Amino acid sequence: MAAKYDLTPRIAPQLDRHLVFPLLEFLQERGLYAEEDILKAKIELLNNTNMVDYAMDIHKSLYHSDDVPNEMVERRVEVVARLKSLEESAAPIITFLQNPNAVQELRADKQHNLQMLNDRYQIGTEQIEALYQYAKFQFECGNYSGAADYLYQYRALSMNSERSLSALWGKLAAEILMQNWDIALEELNRLKEIIDSKTFSSPLNQVQGRIWLMHWSLFIFFNHDNGRTQIIDLFNQDRYLNAIQTNAPHLLRYLATAFIVNKRRRPQFKDFIKVIQQEQYLYEDPITEFLACVYVNFDFDEAQKKMKVCEEVILNDPFLGKRVEGSFTTVPLRDEFLENARLFMFETYCRIHQRIDMGVLAEKLNLNYDEAERWIVDLIRTLKLDAKIDSQTGTIVMEPNHLNVYEQLIDHTKALSGRTHKLVTQLLEHSQQSQPAR
């Protein structure tokens, strides 16, 4: 059943093949698929990389033999020879970059740098492009640290905008694979700025760039200290949310999860529920279905069933179910999710009932009676809810809490201001894109 909700087949096509390996490693650890199938998938991925030694190790594990095909041995010889050739081609620029005194001569003006490199070191565009090829080959060999350094240097020197953009994607992938989350977030923001401002030959290309960016960002947002807030800030922007709804509705799982575990984004959450309502008949995912049950259909029995499925989904999702050592929290995301999901159910159930039977509520929260009573007492105290527990009748009595007319007006004004700001931003962007290039 767990494999039914695995999104890896949908996510993998939007990733660099090297980024798929961590997903397969996770699925292998969870035992979600047969070991043989995972190993075959790894070898298939490795076929178009230069990680020949790794491919040999996987082949030995798959077929329980120390023998490997001759093609792999020959391929290894080719890779070593090619690496040596590329290193020789890039040697002049690498030697320059390894000299701190020489590097200090570089300025922000790329044209000046090219002239200086040519005049003083006999280094031209050919050697700079050789650096890109060498860095790319290093990445394909699995040397992500060396690749990241050289791709960074290449972007600082290159005048080729398209190649520089490709180098930025490569550096982002390398930083993700090294789990350098702060640096990866900086590269992600650079890419976002380029994607949002660049004039693309086709709007579809720009949308595809956003789709790639969001998929790659999942590695960062669910490992970075502030990632679960930043995923909302990115995915919930109109242009990105439209791309999700049109081309990648499976990403709603991650946006929904971020909203559920993030108490600081409640105002935006109300608008997100409208998206869930729009998509509930077009896309199925246990986490979005849970929200639909609670906030759209008010079906708390079904919501309770979905909570159990959501727990399994989170445990078996490569982004939601794994915590790297030293990450932003010691509390598993599953526990945070379940705690907040119960809170959502309690708040919504209380809004539509004035007197609530404790036993019934405990059942809907999937807790025993004593656990439910302690949980609700703590919640009433923490959130300062206008509610009290009647121990004699075993019920919770809710006090009416209606917003006065002034508070309602303020809320509506804030919402209108937010929508106006979005509209003005879209109009300005459309105006800038429509202006002819000079």
Image (cartoon, rainbow, N blue to C red):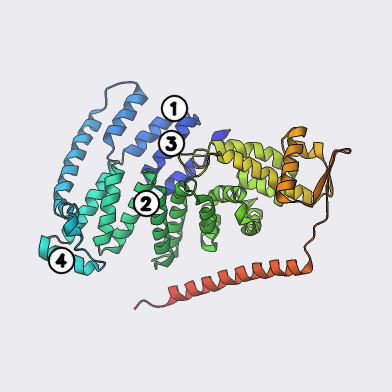
Say above or below: 361 vs 417. above
* Residue at the outermost top position: 65
What element does badge 1 sit on?
A: helix
Dot 3 and dot 4 residues touching (CB under 8 Å): no
| Res 300 → quadrant | top right
CA–CA distance between discs 1 and 4?
A: 55 Å
| Residue position marked by numbered label 1 in the rendering | 35
What element does badge 4 sit on?
A: helix
Earlier-in-chain disc, 2 versus 4: 4
CA–CA distance between discs 2 and 3?
A: 20 Å
CA–CA distance between discs 3 and 4?
A: 47 Å
Pick whichever, 4 or 146, lies toward us: 146
Q: Which mark is residue 172?
A: 2
Of marks 2 and 3, the one in the foreground = 2
Amino acid at the residue labelled 2: Leu
Mark 2, other Cα within 10 Å: few <14 / some 14–19 / many ≥20: many
Q: Residue drawn at (51%, 55%), measured in percent from left and top?
A: 230
What element does badge 2 sit on?
A: helix
CA–CA distance between discs 1 and 2?
A: 30 Å
Mark 4, other Cα within 10 Å: few <14 / some 14–19 / many ≥20: some
Of marks 1 and 4, the one in the foreground = 4
CA–CA distance between discs 2 and 4?
A: 29 Å
Earlier-in-chain disc, 3 versus 1: 3
In screen coordinates, is 393 left or right of 347? right
Q: Which mark is residue 24?
A: 3
| Residue position marked by numbered label 4 in the rendering | 116
Amino acid at the residue labelled 4: Met
Give percent across and percent down for residue 412. Answer: 70, 68
